[in-house]
Image (cartoon, rainbow, N blue to C red):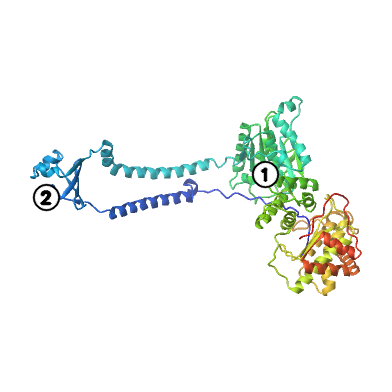
Amino acid sequence: MAIASPKKPKNKKNGTPPPARRGWRALFGGPSFFSNLITTVLIFLLLMSIYSLVEGLAKPAVDVPLSVVAADVAEGKIRSITVNGDSLGLVYTDESTKVSRKDPSAGLPETLATYGVTPEELSKVSITIRGQSGFQFWFLTLAPILLPLLFVAAFFWIISRQVRGAGMQAFSFGQSKARVIDPADSSQRVTFADIAGAREAKEELLEIVDFLKNPKKFLDIGARIPKGIILMGAPGTGKTLLARAVAGEAGVPFFSISGSEFVEMFVGVGASRVRDLFQLAKKAAPAIIFVDEIDAVGRVRGAGVGGGNDEREQTLNQILVEMDGFEPNEKVVVMAATNRPDVLDPALLRPGRFDRRVTIDLPDRRDREEILKIHARAKPLGPDVALAVIAERTPGFSGAELYSLMNEGAILAAREDRKELTQYDLIRSIEKVMLGPERKSHLLSKKEKELTSYHEAGHALVSSVLENADPVHKISIISRGRAAGYTLKLPFEDRKMQSKKQFLDDIAATLGGYVAEEMLFNDVTTGPSNDLVVITALARDMVSRYGMSDKLGPVAFGERAMGNEPYSERVAGEIDDEVSRIIEEARARATAVITKHRKALDAIAKELMEKETVERAEFEKILIAHGITPKAKEEEGIVIAPPRP
């Protein structure tokens, strides 16, 4: 049971490439060499077995003496004779076949005449003479010698290729693994027209595009475009896409590599790959080098990150040296992306290196609508689709999550064999992206269904009554993800900051489910466990990070960890007391709201037990019927999503 709020992105973890093969495995190409060797031997044995089987099944021709041939010709038993050099192929009148040989110095008539065969007897037999060609003669003569030699040569050629490939792999170990996007490849080209939102970031990057297209304009006036641009922002905000768009707008090659690809087990390999990457970019200049997740190698030096491995520091040092080695007229721009700018080494961010920092924020409502339009280009939308409503319901969504939302909507429509996306598909996909798919097989008992209904009704009622809490858009007791039910609360407009009053009302609204269970059933279940974790963390942040405690004042306390104690045990106890006080006061406020509007709580819970899902329009009708004024939007022109049919 949870209050669903906009999803907050998490930091990615960088992977590390597998360690290189060593010893005999590196020399002979590892397991692939021996597997190919065994395969070759097995194929040879299989061919030999097939040949032996065919030879065994073939019926050998009967070889008869020439005297017997002469007697059979005289008796008229032979129908035809085929002469092929010294060999005689005999076909008898009973369709049997035999072979024989004649004297190579005499013809067939003379040879048979010596055995008493008359010309009249021989004329009754059909005689065909086939001359053996020179190629056939030499092939048959040399084949028993050449074929084994050719097989042995092919076998050793395959082995030498394996060894040579392993040796070449060892020589190319320090080469860059960057992926290159050619500006002429229209299928991979991205421009600013393909990116919605990030207006300020695009304005900053347009200067880089202009420099790559016309550097003389800047050099003539003495201006130097920054060598390095670092893109900072939450995961999924489009940092890589913006870097590709710069290359697409400028029409220059785009060298893309991840920071983790520089990190190897052997010291010096990452630095070698950095040198190779910059050499390739300089040869292809004007060009852009893009390093994704640069915090994999750009962390603060000397912090002990990496378990004492100096490879990261060597790689970072080489990056710094390469960026210092740029000439003013070299048209190579280095771009990097990270969602952890706080861990980067200061030398990496000083002027002359990554001295331009472009922050990419999560899109606001207008930007989200534009992003949804881009992702909807190739999708047939129904007449009821209102992307403005979807944008309103997705505060805090990144561009990647909006793409996933549209994709999930298309999957839902295809699953139901429809040719167009409807508004209902997109509304469902919002909840699927935020909370996970519906678990309709997770059936609740009658008692659990009643308890869950009152729990979610408590969240919704307290949130609707308190002035600074977010308005409720939807309530459901259908399980999604790990939650048995959820209350979807979304603000009318995007917020960059939150006040103390808003925090306090959010804590009280989150405790609404706990208080409703305790008051109505005189018991508490495990349902509110996640709610308690959320409000405890929020209350502690208010006291220790935001300076929102009247007792402790505007002081920011650091994190307590082993070996790092930024404050005393006495202060720690006072922080705990303040956290408890904030939660208890919020609990009292939630209790007062539920006690005062008990009838409204019962009506909301009853509606949930009957329909399982209550949309905003139906929920506001219940509030108005019980004398509670729903929260009005400050902006006009936003259409409320229709209730679920």
Kindly identify the residue that appears in the image at 29 percent across and 55 percent down. 57
40 vs 282, left or right, is left
Of marks 2 and 1, the one in the foreground: 2
Image quadrant where residue 197 sits: top right
Position above or below: 532 against 218? below
Looking at numbered disc 2 in the image, what kind of residue is underneath it? Glu
Query: From where the camera sits, is residue 534 visible?
Result: yes
| Marks 2 and 1 close (CB-CB < 8 Å) | no
| Image quadrant in which the C terminus is located | bottom right
Position above or below: 188 against 603? above
**For numbered disc 1, what is the local secondary structure?**
strand
Query: From where the camera sits, is residue 361 visible?
Result: no
| Image quadrant in which the N terminus is located | bottom right
Looking at numbered disc 1 in the image, what kind of residue is underneath it? Asp
Percent x, y of residue 584: 87, 66
609 vs 404, left or right, is right
Tag 2 residue? 75
Q: Which of 214 and 444 lies nearest the eye of the viewer?
A: 444
Q: Which of 138 and 525 lies nearest the eye of the viewer?
A: 138
In primary-sequence order, the first of circles 2 and 1 is 2
Tag 1 residue? 292
Percent x, y of residue 540: 82, 59
What is the CA distance from the residue labelled 2 to the residue labelled 1? 94 Å
Image quadrant where residue 351 sits: top right
Q: Residues within 10 Å of mark 1 (few under 14, many from 20)?
A: many
Q: Which of 466 and 273 lies nearest the eye of the viewer?
A: 466
**For numbered disc 2, what is the local secondary structure?**
helix
Percent x, y of residue 18: 58, 50
Q: Which of 637 and 238 lies nearest the eye of the viewer?
A: 637
Percent x, y of residue 527: 76, 68
191 vs 111, left or right, is right
